[in-house]
Image (cartoon, grey):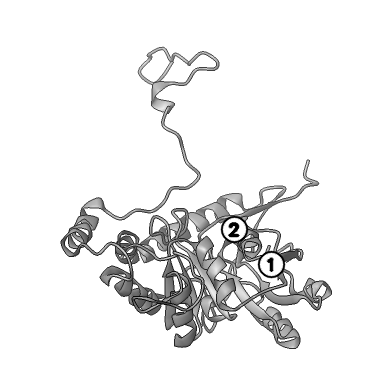
Amino acid sequence: MNKNNDEVVYPAPGTVRKDMEKPIYVTQPYLPPLEEFIPYLEKIWESKILTNSGPFHQQLEKALGDYLGIEHIALFTNGTIALVTALQALRITGEVITTPYSFVATSHSLLWNGIKPVFVDIDPNSLNLDPAKIEAAITPQTTAIMPVHCYGHPCDVEGIQKIADSYNLKVIYDAAHAFGVKDAAGSILRHGDLSVLSFHATKVFNTFEGGAIVCPDAKTKVRIDQLKNFGHVGEVTVVEPGINGKMSEFNAALGLLQLKYVDQAIRQRKTIDAAYRERLKGARGIRCLDDPGENTPNYAYFPILVDTDFR
């Protein structure tokens, strides 16, 4: 009986109540108000420019540079193509040391370039590539290191760079999880030779699909922009084999609107993060990843570590 003394009827085993048919998702993409996106679409219809570094594309590159605190950024159709192109841009060959604890795109980008991934184990606390284990995996064929800022938690960038400098290796960061993440000195994206972002639907900042490469200088950005546009220089000259990795005006337009709301989205995630930590405090067999300390996180994920010996 309920508080109105009505009989409560429970569903038969194996059936689903009508009010329970709507699924509950672990996460959903953040989308801005639809009515605010319509004016962007109207401008695209008016200009008839759909791609090829149109006005929204150029505006988004500038806006992202300002927001992220970086100077040179090249937009892409997705993060995977950006990873593939980053390796091409630095002319990486042979073997690359990377982490086995990542989405398959990290290692697939190496294989698509004919590069052998060499996996090095992760630190059990940070879940990032363990610098203490990198040197043992270096061979004469090693040309680069590709770490991942897993769950948006910064890698030991100083430890990794020290090894890279000692062995003359390039460092490309898979920063798919690290949009807006900062360490004590600023954007985490400034580390390494290149950093690659993903703007996939599941990310803190999304453009439906999308990605970007953060470049150290204008010359590198020019080469990357050529590679993502079939190797074109000007209208008719092709200087090298390239790929079609350009971001469309539709994706760029959404990105511009998303930037207006990304801080709000991160604040909401921070509130949820704090609630989870409070409610899981003292739970047997479960440990939350350490607090970010002096780093500024984006609260993209909430991983927990489960004690395998817990009974």
| Location of residue 79 in the rendering, given as x and y in whole percent from the top left corner | 50, 63
Name the mark on residue 115.
Answer: 1
Q: Nearer the viewer, mark 2 or mark 1?
A: 1
Extreme residue toward the right, this view: 136
* Quadrant of residue 153 within the rendered picture: bottom right
Residue 277: numbered disc: none
Q: Can residue 239 be seen in this view?
A: yes
Amino acid type, mark 1: Ile
Q: Which residue is drawn at 64% across and 65% down?
A: 110
Q: Which residue lies furthest to the left in this view?
A: 46
Q: Which residue is drawn at 64% across and 78% down?
A: 171
Q: What element carries label 2?
A: helix
Total of numbered circles in the picture? Answer: 2
Q: Where is residue 2 in the image (x, y as percent from the top left)?
A: 41, 19
Side (left or right) of 294 relative to 111? left
The CA distance from mark 2 to mark 1 is 13 Å
Q: Quadrant of the N terminus?
A: top left
Secondary structure found at label 1 = loop
Left or right: residue 35 compared with residue 198: left
- Residue 48 to residue 155: above or below: above
Name the residue furthest front.
236
Left or right: residue 3 versus residue 169 is: left
Residue 105, label in figure = 2
Where residue 199 appears, as percent x and y from the top left, is 44, 61
Tell me, yes or no, if residue 178 can be seen here. no
Is 232 or 285 nearer to us in this picture? Answer: 232
Query: Which amino acid does the dot numbered 2 rest on?
Result: Ala
State the image coordinates of residue 68 (x, y, percent, origin top left). 43, 76
Towards the viewer: 299 or 176: 176
Question: Looking at the image, which is closer to me, 133 or 292?
Answer: 133
Nearest to N terminus: mark 2 or mark 1: 2
